[in-house]
Image (cartoon, grey):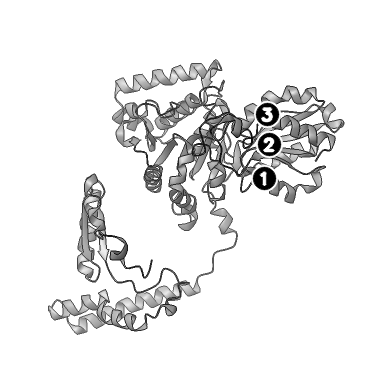
Amino acid sequence: AINTYTPDIATNGKVYEQGKHYGVPGLLVDGLNAADVAKGGKAVIDYIRSGKGPAMLQVHTYRFNGHSPADPEHERGRKEEKQWARSEQDPIKAFEDKYITGGVFTEDELKAARKEVLADVKESVKFADASPMPPVELAKELEYPDVPDTDYNLKPAPEYAAEVNARTISPQQMETVTTHIETLQERAKAGEISIGDAINLAIHEEMLRDPTTTIHAEDLQAGSSYDIPKLTQQTYGQIRAADEIIDEGHFIGKALGEAMNGYRPIVELMNTNFGIYGMAELSSAGNTFATTGGQFDMPMTIIGAGGTAPNQALGAEHSQPFHAYVMGIPGLKICTAASPEAAYGITKSMIRDNGPCFLFAPVKMMKEAKGPVDLGKCAPLNKAALLHEASQESVDEGGAVTVLTYLHGVKESETAIEAIQAEGCDIDLIELRTLKPLDMETITASLARTNKLCILDESTKSGGVGATISAQVSEELFDLLDAPVKRLCMDDAPVPYASSMEEAVVKRGSDLIKGVVDLCVGNH
């Protein structure tokens, strides 16, 4: 918007006043006046650092250069304008003129200062010119702060945790949360804990382990929809556990800022579909480690219920494959969990990871799916799980198929195994607990046995998870395939609310049975 005239499109150009309804003060300064900019900037920074909250600083100034070196300013006919600007809108020139006229310093003093500054500039340019360009390997090294095969069980807890907890959590609060944790742990041992409760258990354990851990969620005080943030604000207070308005971009952005300042924020999205309103913030989170040359970690964990189950009846807006949308954001580790064990272990690891992580859980299985949990154990963020192995007999007879799936597809696949076996076939069922980075090692080992691949995919045919995996398998493992990859993915149409229409869009267990049998009999 280099040439956009603000009054043409905005009645109120006083940006600094826009926070007053939220108790956020603002200040307007003239960007031509260097002293006022310095004073205004100090006033705003001092206000923030004093703990009074945020503040806004608006600087009115002339823009000398384009948005980037690629901006074709010479085509905009601004030659005369820029000549005027350098004469009348240069803040350095205005600063010098004002303080020479006012007798603050002399022309000779100014010349001496210029000489000193120019010497520093020349030395800096000389240093830059002599510095080597960064090595090509650095690009991949800056993808993640923690390498994909990190063992999060080995990460030590902060030494100050006990002291901070004793100072910030009252004995009554500690007794309440300890009882809550023990209750969940007993359910876990009995195999009766849900996915939502398993995540909640992991969060409490990690928030007690590391007091820099924070959490943001809508309806947080009430436990949200699936009890993921249950008892967090009641235990850790409003600063560490913030109840948020329905504005996902807003509180993902808050978490991003916290992560850059030494905290470990958790964001719970009641439904991951609405993370779409925080795409800019998610992109920034994924890029921060690389764009700062590794100077800033981004230990932010986003967790939420998502995916699209058969007969979900949530309509198009709540049934989008957001997990596929974020696959293209660099720097994100993206996982899924269709069981309490996976949800618990992955949550703990993500909170300890120094980069941005996103965990998707199946929206229709959050309370329904129950099972045991390996208490205290962090799960890897780069490994799939082999849930069912095809019999050697089916492999020898060419009737075995590798099935890749995740979220609700896990339940659909497990319930279809008996029917598949009744057809004389069998499957290696692999749960894709990590979508990025993808566990090609596990996929390769299975395909070496079965030589056939079927993907039950909870995303669209165009640009979906299955499309990415299919392309990678075809590129890297083509010689292991005896048949084309079978993709059972969502249609590109919006997901209907009516179940009769939804069958045409969302794939399920019955589609998997047919897809596996077709591969085994050569019906490609």
Element assignment for label 1: helix
Kindly identify the residue that appears in the image at 80 percent across and 36 percent down: 519
Q: Do the CB atoms of the residues marked 1 and 2 lie less than 8 Å apart? A: yes
Kindly identify the residue that appears in the image at 29 percent across and 60 percent down: 10
Q: Callout 1, which amino acid?
A: Ile
Percent of width and height locating residue 64: 34, 74
Q: Please give the label number shown on residue 469.
A: 1
Kindly identify the residue that appears in the image at 72 percent across and 25 percent down: 417
Instruction: Give the camera-side residue of 244 and 354.
Output: 244
Quadrant where the image shows the N terminus = bottom left
Q: Please give the label number shown on residue 404.
A: 2
Left or right: 413, with 121 as reference point = right
Mark toward the start of the polypeptide (2 vs 3):
2
Residue mark closest to the camera, 2 vs 3: 3
Instruction: Give the camera-side residue of 305 and 372.
Output: 305
Compute the Cα span from label 3 to label 1: 20 Å
Q: Is residue 244 above or below residue 285?
A: above
Look at mark 3 in the image and give the residue it sits on.
509
